[in-house]
Amino acid sequence: MMKTSTFFLGLATGSVAAAVTVLYSTPKSGSELRTTVKSASTDMKSKFKDVKVNLAVLKESISHLSKEVKETVPSAVADIKGSVEQWQHSTEQNKNRLEVELNAIQTAIEELEQSIAAQQK
């Protein structure tokens, strides 16, 4: 939020500096210069008001987004956690079955090795 405020402050300051530079570098009579300054002042006030409104809208948007994240993220995390637990539960039977089959294969290999060793003697 600070960086956005700094940006808009810099933008407004730059606009004022540019307006003042243009006003004083242009040859005009006193009344024309006063009219131009008054017009520029009114324009700057309008621009500052727009910046203030935009900052308020931005602040409200950030507040709304923050609130939405606080409400949405915990339920999403809970849903993901539930899905992982459900997946783990559903794969547990397959895991156990695979372990039994691997043990049976390992036993068969050991028996085969013993049989081959016995035949070679």
Image (tube, rainbow, N blue to C red):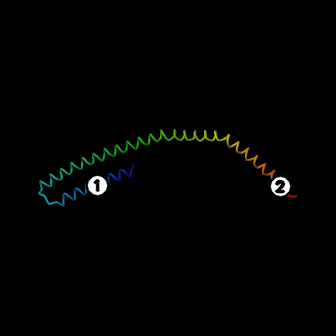
Q: Percent from the top left, x then y, of residue 54?
A: 32, 45
Residue 34 numbered tag: none
Q: Percent from the top left, x then y, of residue 28?
A: 13, 58
Q: Percent from the top left, x then y, of residue 18?
A: 24, 57
* Direction from residue 65 to residue 46 in the image, left or right: left
Q: Which residue is rendered at x = 73% and y = 47% of the image?
A: 102
Q: Percent from the top left, x then y, of residue 45?
A: 24, 48
Between 91 and 83, the one nearer to me in the picture: 91
Looking at the rendering, which quadrant does residue 118 occupy?
Answer: bottom right
Q: Secondary structure at mark 1?
A: helix
Mark 2 is surrounded, within 10 Å at the Cα level, by few (under 14), some (14 to 19) or many (20 or more) other residues, namely few
Q: Which residue is rendered at x = 63% and y = 39% of the image?
A: 90
Q: Which residue is mark 1?
A: 13
Farthest right residue? 121
* Direction from residue 26 to residue 15 in the image, left or right: right
Q: Which residue is mark 2?
A: 116
Mark 1 is surrounded, within 10 Å at the Cα level, by few (under 14), some (14 to 19) or many (20 or more) other residues, namely few
Between 56 and 115, the one nearer to me in the picture: 115
Looking at the rendering, which quadrant does residue 20 occupy?
Answer: bottom left
Of mark 2 and mark 1, the one earlier in the sequence is: 1
Q: Indicate the amino acid at tag 1.
A: Thr
- Up/down of 40 relative to 85, above or below: below
Q: Which residue is rendered at x = 48% and y = 39% of the image?
A: 72
How many numbered marks, from 0 up?
2
Are discs 2 and 1 less than 8 Å apart at CB?
no
Between 10 and 97, the one nearer to me in the picture: 97
